[in-house]
Each structure stands twice: as structure tokens, then as C-alpha cells.
Image (cartoon, helix red, strand yellow):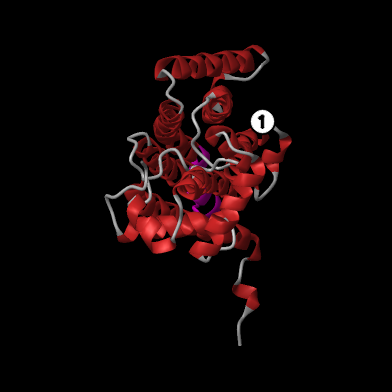
Amino acid sequence: MLNYDNINFDTLPLWLSFVLCLSMTAGGLLILFRFHQTRKSSSFQYLQIFLILLYVYGYYSLWSGILLSGFMQIENVQRVALLLAQMGAPFLMVSLTMLLVWAARLQKRPVMPVLLLTAVSSAVVVLALVWWGWSLADSLSSLGSVVAMTSTLALLGVLLSGKQPFISRLGKRWLMMLIFASGIIHLFVFTPLTAYQHFNGVFAFLFYLFNTAMVVVYCYEATEETAPPSLPLDDILHRYGISKREADVLRGIYAGQTNQEIANQLFISLQTVKDHSSRIYQKTFVKNRAQLTTLIRESQNNHPGVSIRS
């Protein structure tokens, strides 16, 4: 029989969080490299670097400190954990820099003003913390959270103010919410919640969850950087019996445009777009936009290097 007396139930939430973080790391990296082949713009590589370095920081700084404090009985364990966190801080700084570079290039904005504004904002917040009574050691240990929050605000500003289409409407909503959540969790570092027994484990889990989900949503819902569908227009016309005007509507659907946006672009009525869309779904044997986009992407994987764009 299982002897429950030998099980330390207090550490179970910590181990569960650690295993979940490992799973998210594996899943996030697999998705990144899977979609790498379908991204033509060089900006996608910055998103890859961001997530990889973020994971390095997570295990080097967050989890090393948590595991040291929770399971190792050595002298000055807190100092060792703090030292590891400080040594891992550059990974976080570089990863956030890569994220901002990705967003700026995605929206065709100059990179340096975004980085300088974020750096100045972070410095102002740290100085304010010191002014309000924080010790320099406290401010240094919280520097990563400060930079993460200011970087999140800068990221949201760049993506929301930019005019370049890069993601579907639904995907954009989820992406913005996840970016906001990835920044807001750092506020809890400055609250009494840090005294909670499992705070660090919960924080690490949310840190991995929101950042990984953010990249996953972009990978699956991106339109601007997605490699164009691989079937040539003539093959689509022949294989699915789609007319020239229906092909124009199909391009708009694949680009993540709404029916009204497609109508405005093609100078046709909204009802005409809906009629064309309905016939496209019937001809391609799909039920909605998502299935149609998946069909085109699968066709691209089977016929690399060919485009339906006119």
C-alpha cells in the first residue's frame, strides 16, 4: 500500500507548477519551429529569440531560486537565489528587447525610439521606487518586473497604434489580452502576496502560461507574415471551381479581413461578399473561415514555394 506519511503534500503544488512549465516550454518551442517555415518576414526570428531567452531566464532565475529555497538546505540560500536571479536578468532584458524589435518591425516602425522610450520609462520607475523608500537592493531585484511592465505597455502601444494588418480580428483580441496579462502579473511582485507560501510557483506558472500562449496565438492567427498559400490561382480555379471574383474574396478571407473590409476593397456590397463566401465554402467543402484557412495552409505545406497571390 502507498504510504502517504512519506509524501510532502506542501510541495505538490510546486512540483505541479514545474511540470506544467516544462510542458509549456516543450509545446512552445515545437510550435515556434513548426511555424518557422511558413513565416517569410525576418521579424519572426525575433519572436523566436524572445521566447527561447525567456525560457532560459525562467529556468535560470525563477525556477533555480524557487527550487533552491524550497528544497536545498545550504547557508545563505536566499543570497544564492538572489545572485542567480541577478545573473539571469540579462536574458530577460534581451528577450524583451527582441519582443519590442519584433513588434516594431512587424508594424514597420523605427526600432530605436521604442527601445529608448522603454528604457527611459523603466529608469524613471526604478528611481521612483528608490525615492519612495525602497532600498537599492529591492529595486534591483524588482528591476526585471519593472522592465517587463514597461515593455508590455510599449508593446501594446506599438501593436495597437500600427496600421499594418498582421493577425485576424479574433486573434488580435486574444493577443492583446495575453500581452496585458503577461505584464500585469508583475504588479503582484510589489504586493504583500509575495509572502504567500506558493506565490513564486504560481507566479512562474502564470509567467510561462501568458508568454507562451501569446506566441501560440500569434503563430496560429497571424496573417501578415504567413507564407502565402501554395496552390497557384489556376490550380484553385481548376480544383475547386472558384471564379475570379470568388478568388478575390478568398484572398481577403485568408488575410483575416472582415466581410465589410473585403467589400470596401473590392467595391462590392456586403451581401455580395457573403454570397461569394458561401459559394466558396460549398465548393471547398468547409463550413467556416477557420476551416478554409486551414485548408489553404495545408495545401501550402504540400506544395511549398507557390503562391495564390495575383
The residue closer to the viewer here, 22 or 111, is 111
Q: Give the image location of residue 288, x and y in percent.
A: 59, 58
Q: Is residue 67 left or right of residue 268?
A: left
Mark 1 = which residue?
190
Check disc 1: other Cα within 10 Å, few if <14, some if 14-19, many if 20+. few
Q: Is residue 223 left or right of residue 231?
A: right
The residue closer to the viewer here, 37 or 22, is 37
Q: Amino acid at mark 1?
A: Phe
Residue 47, quarter of picture: top left
Magenta segment range? 66-78
State whether residue 243 is above or below residue 41.
below
- Residue sitting at x 61%, y 52%: 275
Q: Give the image location of residue 276, x and y in percent.
A: 57, 51
Q: Give the image location of residue 64, x and y in percent.
A: 46, 47
Of helix, strand and loop, which mostly describes the magenta segment? Answer: helix
Residue 230 appears anywhere in the view: no
Q: Residue at the far right: name it.
A: 192
Q: Secondary structure at mark 1?
A: helix
State whether residue 256 is above or below residue 235.
above
Residue 262 appears anywhere in the view: yes
